[in-house]
Amino acid sequence: EAQVTQNPRYLITVTGKKLTVTCSQNMNHEYMSWYRQDPGLGLRQIYYSMNVEVTDKGDVPEGYKVSRKEKRNFPLILESPSPNQTSLYFCASSFDGFYQETQYFGPGTRLLVL
Amino acid sequence: AQSVSQHNHHVILSEAASLELGCNYSYGGTVNLFWYVQYPGQHLQLLLKYFSGDPLVKGIKGFEAEFIKSKFSFNLRKPSVQWSDTAEYFCAVNAGTYKYIFGTGTRLKVLA
């Protein structure tokens, strides 16, 4: 089944404790992206990757890192999480990110930073 | 900077009522426009998209949207909503780059 998976689905952590949220897709998509969803703010793009080893910042990259060493995986790293990073995070992928392509979204990861 | 506005944050309708959700974007060049839907407990999924051609686009589940370039709008419509349309709806814009801008979303509740 074609899908985007994220792990963990729920995470409670404390300020400053490094964490990684994994994202994997099995559709051989070139483009992958991370979003955060906050009430009243909608989805905001954090980082995206056009292909292996090619990443760029979205609108809200502060406090996040990403890497794309393999085509199928695009982990989101929070080196020193803070409470303002409490949010619902979505990973998405598409064949390529240009123009018309539909993005396929993962199930979301709900993060609480205490 | 590009932006997307969804003016209706919460909409409550009775079944069989007609639906129109507004979406306006700010960008003067060529854009690609999307409506995504998030049903309760499910993944975000594409409803419809526009990139060129006929400005009236038809999507899944009876939804359609009209691109009006002069108004920078891409409003979503459905002639008769069902209880199963209860969801959150997001308008999104891609201005020919790898970046996507999403609106703040509209929560639709359809009363049976």
Image (spheres, coloured by chain):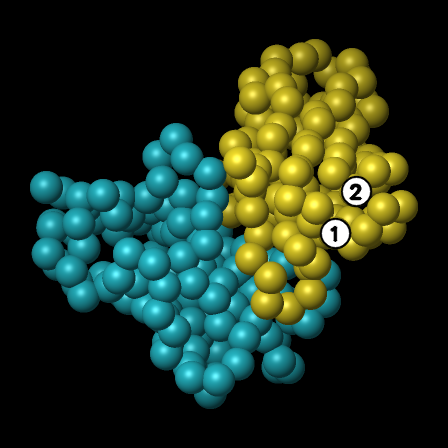
Q: Estimate the spatial distance between the alpha carbons at disc 1 and disc 2, rounded to whole Å.
A: 7 Å
* Residue B24 rendering spot, x and y as whole percentages: 46, 70
Color used for chain A? yellow
Residue at point 40%, 49% (across, down): B37
Question: Splitting the image into 4 quarters, where does residue B60 fall?
Answer: bottom left
Q: Which residue is mark 2?
A: A71
Figure check: A31 above or below A108: below
Q: Which residue is mark 1?
A: A30
Q: Nearer the N terminus, badge 1 or badge 2?
A: 1
* Residue B75 rendering spot, x and y as whole percentages: 37, 69
Secondary structure under the numbered disc 2 in the rendered image: loop
> Residue A82: in sight, yes or no?
yes
Secondary structure under the numbered disc 1 in the rendered image: loop
Q: Pointer 2 indicates a residue of which chain?
A: A
Residue at point 78%, 54% (across, down): A50
Count of marks placed on residues? 2
Q: Pointer 1 indicates a residue of which chain?
A: A
Question: Splitting the image into 4 quarters, where does residue B110 fall?
Answer: top left
Using a 10 Å C-alpha cutoff, classify the residue at mark 2 as few (fewer than 14 neighbours), some (14 to 19) or many (20 or more): many
In the picture, measured across the screen, residue B43 lies left or right of residue B93, that is left
Please state which amino acid type lies under the numbered disc 1.
Glu
In the image, farthest residue toward the front: A1
Please state which amino acid type lies under the numbered disc 2.
Lys
